Image (spheres, helix red, strand yellow):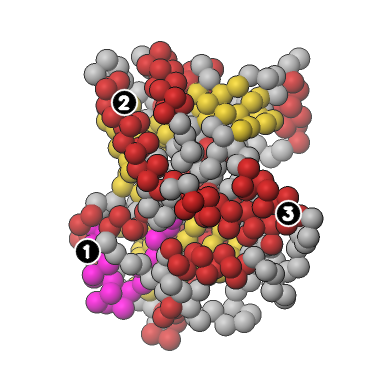
Amino acid sequence: MTATLDLKALHDRWVMPTYAPSLALVSGKGTRVVDADGKSYLDFGSGIAVNNLGHCHPAVVDAIRRQTEKLLHVSNLFVNENQPRLARRIASIGLGGKVFFCNSGAEANEALIKLARLHGAPSGRFEIITMRNSFHGRTLATMTATGQTKYQKGFEPLVPGFVYADFNDFDSVRAAATLRTAAVLVEAVQGEGGILPASFTFMQALRQWTAENGILLLIDEVQAGIGRTGAWFAWQHYGIRPDGFSMAKALGGGLPIGAAAVTPELSDTFSPGKHASTFGGNPVATAAALAVLDTIEKDRLLDRATTAGIAIMDALHALASCHACIETVRGIGLMIGLVLNIPAAPVAAALRDAGLLVIPTGERVLRLVPPLTVTDAEIAEAIAILDRVLP
Ligand SMILES: *Cc1c(COP(=O)(O)O)cnc(C)c1O
């Protein structure tokens, strides 16, 4: 048996089958990752848009190592030295208000949902409008917020108070509103829905209408955030300021951390006892996140995401002329969807066997989310593998 098959057998025997993993990966550096049998892959999946600095970035590893020698955990009954610094940093690149820390994207959205309900309670507002084809997480509330029945089947009854509208269709959002509407929760770029950017006019209309009607505009930046689209947060492409937004995936450079950030006006909506997380803002995870944000700034990786994204999308457009399976290319920065007219999963498997990791999203979309540190040579290599493997 190969080492990969050994590990896979162990996994299948003891880990609940919520995923169906193929490879067993044991080490990584930058854009490359190595499996248990020593085979190397170009990683354009980045652990589902988590490794925005690639695998084991030295600045992140160093920050984690230094913190682990000092203090691992104290709970939020005490202040740790990294959490408030990270909150100030997120405020400075985001909305200027306070931050709540947790451990995942679902929890970050859950915090926004609870905050919206608490904020709306005095005026009887509790409904949250979310979009069809969205993805917000797997807890009961965020799974209900997720506008795709395939994630909800069998888990009924769902959480009350969620109403769905069509993404990029402002009239359908307005039609879903009632006097009980507390908030609209939306992704600026739908990730699991197939890498679908919101239109400029949709986001502008949403912002104006929610502001005029006392409805909070909340943006899920869990996948698009932390520089992936060429801005710190994807909402920054739309000339708007939301009332709050969530982040997670790439924030910790590979360590689990989530956060919900709001405007100064909403900063004290939660009072002590209203919400909590034992591990939220943990000293090690926040040390890693500070190193991630510093590195993105110092190495000008927002600009790199933009230029690398354009290079990849141009190359994919060129591939489309000789591969009939390519329907279209869409995305912003390094959040790219290669839309096929055939099922994406078997193509992703063939690419994996050829040494390139990409993640299908939706039925027919290959998601390309390489690290922001991806080099031109690695882009050329990935495009060559695509050219060889795509029918
Ligand atoms: C991944 C994701 C989530 C859920 O994050 P978890 O950390 O898996 O809970 C929520 N929203 C979006 C847009 C995501 O991509």
Looking at the image, can residue 229 be seen? no
Q: Earlier in the sequence, mark 2 or mark 3?
A: 3
381 horizontally vs 294: left or right: left
The residue at label 1 has a CB less than 8 Å from ligand 1 = no
Q: Contact, CB < 8 Å: mark 2 with mark 3?
A: no
The numbered mark at residue 16 is none
For residue 181, side relative to residue 171 (left or right): right
Mark drawn on residue 66: 3
Where residue 151 appears, as percent x and y from the top left, is 49, 47
The residue that disc 1 covers is: 205
Q: Nearer the viewer, residue 241 or 20?
A: 241
Name which of mark 1 and mark 2 comes first in the sequence. Answer: 1
| Pointer 1 with pointer 3, Cβ within 8 A | no
Q: Magenta stretch: residue 210 in it?
A: yes
Residue 311 higher or lower than 381, as above or below: below
The answer to whether residue 59 is left or right of residue 68 is left
Q: Secondary structure at mark 3?
A: helix
